[in-house]
């Protein structure tokens, strides 16, 4: 009996230490020297490929600043799942936490606790809208104005600044898409350059491939003289390209929008799509990592209007509510798409 | 049933009899449902402190319990359900539906104290719905609650959509930041409820009926016990736990959306089984469930401060569950009939 208990103790011990080894191996060094800067990134959830280039960028920025970088992710993207992870990192005494929050308000108390212990908080990609005082800096992709304007310019350049076009969006209440579409409408009205371009309809594919495809096909049927489709969502732009390719209308109907290079590579290569845009998640990660390192070493005190240099990205300015913008969207064409892998 | 020890005692020396009793005591301790959990908890504390210098800190560990309190309430009630040889897969979905309706009611102007009572009543109602289907329509609880798992979550999702509801009054928020010394209030509430439920399970007639039902339903029915009422009782209790879980969640998380409480029913069942309660019913304890909850907190915190990836954390908790069930099964098969000195290989007694 004693032997059994001893065996049990030893096996449990082994089991746990194996887990420990694999963990530290993959999560990077957990060295805890008094002076080393430790940055940890908490994405929305595991197994989300969008965050991979972001993590790469952050890792690079931390390397350049001599900081130790690690990342931990919850298994599901709900509001509750990030709280215990933040508590663990507070206990580890990290210098800064970069986080893509799953909720704009559920994290308030735990972030307040972290900041009271001197830990800097940088939100990445999504912000604590309405609760900005609970983080030090928010690093966002692009501002809505630039996205909206650049999408119209991209469409215009593809259709020679004249003709009918439609928008294939995500859901009717998607906040980002609605802001961008609003800017697109304003741009069309206010800039005489786009006088001869006419927005005929906005349809919603709910970010579902099947529904987006159906909506895009319906547009082609409904408007035989349609010159273009803007799909400011990654699911939508692929679906629109698919619809145009199937209908063999790539010459008449130009598709553009926001998509990832890996998803759109095929359509660029076979000529269905000439150009589309997206911000660079790698740059976004790099900028957040850089900001976190600057904050942790006290080299940056965030305030509206402050300028700083973020390594190879160059100069950035802190805007209202301590927001830093990654940069203008990158336009992908047949010439540059092979340089990107995300 | 038989008492074979009597055959040996006259022939054994007094000393041997004493040793036999000691062996019996050790064995019966090991056979207690919660012993394995207790051992694992101690091991986890030891391993945790060897893995990271940041782990062994009472304030931190007590703080970490707060995230497990909603699931803790579900697990306490689930202990009754499983001892009665039933299962309730709908607890997490029911908690979500309760939280959604309560938060919605508050956003429509119902005062918070009324909402708090309402939460418990909604939970009770959802539990009774399961209970009536199981007890009076005599449907298997696995199938009924598999159905209501989807039904309650579906209703909650339909009700709230992609949105979220917050805006609870300030006094109601942040129960996890109210502390007595370094012990957070939610943990004290859970322990208080656990103590009360532990007494009900072991000292009340209802508790005995729950054990009887889980051991042998037909025998219980022939003993003139109203089996349906006992079943209704355990599901009502499970329903109340949904109300409690919803309230703690609203106070701690401050906002309710449809992604919350995802697969928490599995975590609750894990805690109950890890606590030594038999999934076949008739055996188990509240103490075991409480220890198992603490074990989950300790293990996840130890791995959290050591930066173990969440995927590996899940795998380790899974292996722990399998190992614990396997070992307690082995222990429960050990034959106690023949006397034998301590330390002897248990297999020898069968020879």
Image: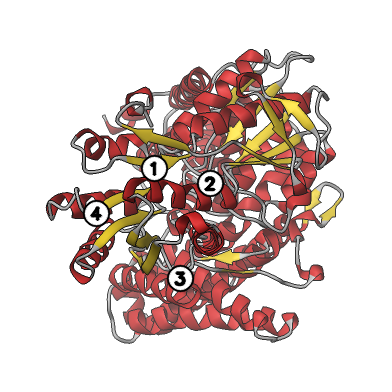
The mark nearer the N terminus, 2 or 1, is 2
Question: In the image, A268: left or right of B268?
Answer: left
Which residue has dot 1 on it? B325
Q: CA distance from mark 4 to mark 1?
A: 63 Å
Q: Which residue is mark 3?
A: B210
Give whichever of A41, B93 is nearer the camera. A41
Disc 4 vs disc 1: Cβ atoms closer than 8 Å? no
> Sequence order check: which comes first, mark 1 or mark 3?
3
Does residue A114 lie above or below A167 as drawn?
above
| Discs 3 and 2 share one subunit | yes
Q: On the image, numbered disc 4 is attached to which residue?
A: A253
Q: Position of residue B98 (x, y in %)?
A: 54, 75
Label 4 near label 2: C-beta < 8 Å? no
State whether discs 2 and 1 lie on one chain: yes
Residue at mark 4 shares a chain with residue at mark 1:
no
Residue B42 drawn at (x, y percent): 61, 32
Query: Which mark is first along the chain, 2 or 3?
Result: 2
B86 to the left or right of A66: left
Residue under numbered circle 2: B34
């Amino acid at each position: 009996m004693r032997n059994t208990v001893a065996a049990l103790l030893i096996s449990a011990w082994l089991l746990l230490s194996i887990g420990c080894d694999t963990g530290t191996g993959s999560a990077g060094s957990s060295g805890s020297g008094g002076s080393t800067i430790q940055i940890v990134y908490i994405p929305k959830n595991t197994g989300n490929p969008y965050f991979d280039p972001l993590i790469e960028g952050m890792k690079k920025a931390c390397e350049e600043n001599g900081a130790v970088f690690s990342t931990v992710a919850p298994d599901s993207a709900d509001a509750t799942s990030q709280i215990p992870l933040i508590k663990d990192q507070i206990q580890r005494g990290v210098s800064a936490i970069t986080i893509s929050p799953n909720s704009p308000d559920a994290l308030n108390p735990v972030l307040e606790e972290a900041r009271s212990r001197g830990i800097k908080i940088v939100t990445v990609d999504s912000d604590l809208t309405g609760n900005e005082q609970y983080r030090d800096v928010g690093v966002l992709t692009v501002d809505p104005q630039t996205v909206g304007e650049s999408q119209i310019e991209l469409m215009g350049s593809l259709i020679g600044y004249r003709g009918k076009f439609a928008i294939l969006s995500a859901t009717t209440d998607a906040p980002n898409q609605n802001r961008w579409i609003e800017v697109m409408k304003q741009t069309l009205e206010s800039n005489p350059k786009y006088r001869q371009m006419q927005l005929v309809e906005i349809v919603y594919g709910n970010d579902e491939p099947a529904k987006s495809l159906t909506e895009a096909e319906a547009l082609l049927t409904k408007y035989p003289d349609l010159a273009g489709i803007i799909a400011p969502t990654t699911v939508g732009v692929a679906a629109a390209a698919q619809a145009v390719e199937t209908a063999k209308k790539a010459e008449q109907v130009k598709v553009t929008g926001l998509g990832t290079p890996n998803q759109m590579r095929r359509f660029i290569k076979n000529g269905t799509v000439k150009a589309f845009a997206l911000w660079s998640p790698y740059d976004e990660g790099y900028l957040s990592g850089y900001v976190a390192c600057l904050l942790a070493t006290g080299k940056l005190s965030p305030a509206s209007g402050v300028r700083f240099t973020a390594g190879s990205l160059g100069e950035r300015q802190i805007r209202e509510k301590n927001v830093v913008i990654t940069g203008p969207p990158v336009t992908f064409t047949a010439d540059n798409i092979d340089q990107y892998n995300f | 049933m038989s008492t074979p020890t009597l055959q040996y005692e006259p022939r054994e020396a007094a000393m041997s009899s004493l040793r036999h009793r000691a062996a019996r005591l050790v064995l019966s301790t090991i056979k207690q449902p919660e012993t394995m959990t207790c051992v694992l908890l101690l091991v986890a504390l030891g391993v945790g402190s060897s893995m990271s210098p940041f782990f062994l800190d009472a304030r931190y560990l007590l703080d970490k319990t707060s995230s497990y309190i909603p699931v803790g309430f579900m697990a306490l009630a689930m202990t009754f359900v499983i001892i009665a040889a039933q299962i309730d897969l709908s607890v997490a979905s029911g908690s979500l539906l309760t939280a959604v309706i309560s938060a919605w009611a508050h956003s429509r102007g119902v005062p918070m104290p009324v909402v708090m009572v309402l939460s418990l009543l909604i939970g009770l109602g959802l539990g009774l719905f399961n209970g009536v289907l199981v007890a009076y329509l005599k449907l298997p609880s696995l199938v009924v609650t598999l159905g209501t798992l989807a039904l309650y979550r579906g209703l909650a999702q339909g009700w709230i959509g992609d949105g979220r509801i917050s805006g609870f009054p300030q006094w109601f928020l942040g129960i996890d930041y109210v502390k007595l010394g370094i012990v957070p209030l939610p943990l004290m509430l859970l322990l208080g409820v656990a103590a009360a439920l532990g007494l009900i399970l072991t000292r009340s007639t209802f508790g005995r009926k729950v054990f009887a039902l889980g051991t042998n339903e037909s025998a219980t029915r022939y003993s003139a016990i109203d089996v349906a009422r006992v079943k209704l009782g355990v599901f009502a209790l499970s329903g109340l736990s949904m109300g409690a879980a919803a309230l703690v969640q609203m106070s701690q998380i401050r906002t309710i959306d449809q992604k919350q409480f995802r697969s928490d029913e599995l975590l609750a069942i894990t805690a109950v089984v890890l606590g030594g309660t038999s999934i076949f019913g008739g055996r188990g304890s509240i103490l075991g469930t409480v220890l198992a909850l603490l074990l989950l907190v300790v293990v996840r915190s130890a791995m959290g401060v050591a930066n173990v990836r969440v995927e590996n954390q899940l795998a380790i908790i899974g292996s722990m569950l399998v190992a614990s069930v396997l070992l307690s099964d082995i222990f429960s098969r050990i034959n106690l009939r023949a006397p034998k000195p301590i330390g002897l290989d248990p297999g020898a007694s069968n020879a």
